[in-house]
Image: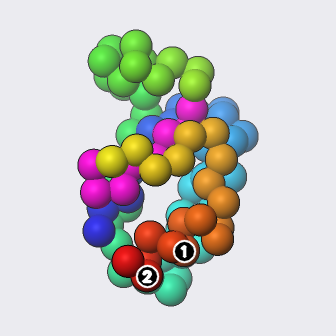
Amino acid sequence: MIIELYSRPGCHLCEEARKVILNAAKRHPFDFVEHNVEQNQEWEREFGWDIPVVFIDGRKAFKHKVEPASLERYFVR
């Protein structure tokens, strides 16, 4: 499983999402990649300030908030 977080520095919602994801990493194996939208014009156009956005295995799973219980459901599939 690959979890990707699209974020930007200074985004408090992004920091919260990162914490939830990294906490799940203590219990479940997955690859985690964080993308700074400021480093890619395409990501900046697509997401802008409408972040964080989380993709799991290439599919959009969360936007703005990652609920721990909702994330856990991805590991029981």
Residue closest to the eye, 57 or 52: 57
Can residue 15 be seen here? The reply is no
Seen in the picture, residue 56 relative to 45 is either above or below; the reply is below
Disc 1 to disc 2, how far (Cα)? Answer: 7 Å
Q: Quadrant of the N terminus?
A: bottom left
Q: Which mark is residue 76?
A: 2
Classify mark 2: residues with Cα within 10 Å, few (<14), some (14-19) or many (20+): few
Element at badge 2? loop
Give the magenta-colored segment's residue range.
Answer: 51-58
Callout 1–callout 2 Cβ contact below 8 Å: yes
Q: x, y (%) of residue 11? A: 66, 35
Instruction: Classify residue 15 as left or right of residue 30.
Output: right
Q: Residue at x 28, y 57 (%)?
A: 57
Tag 1 residue: 72
Instruction: Classify residue 65 as left or right of residue 61.
Output: right
Residue closest to the eye, 28 or 69: 69
Q: x, y (%) of residue 56? A: 36, 56
**Residue at the outermost bottom position:** 27
Q: Quadrant of the C terminus?
A: bottom left
Q: Residue at x 43, y 27 (%)?
A: 37
Q: Residue at x 63, y 39 (%)?
A: 64
Element at badge 1? helix
Q: Label 1 sits on what residue type? A: Glu
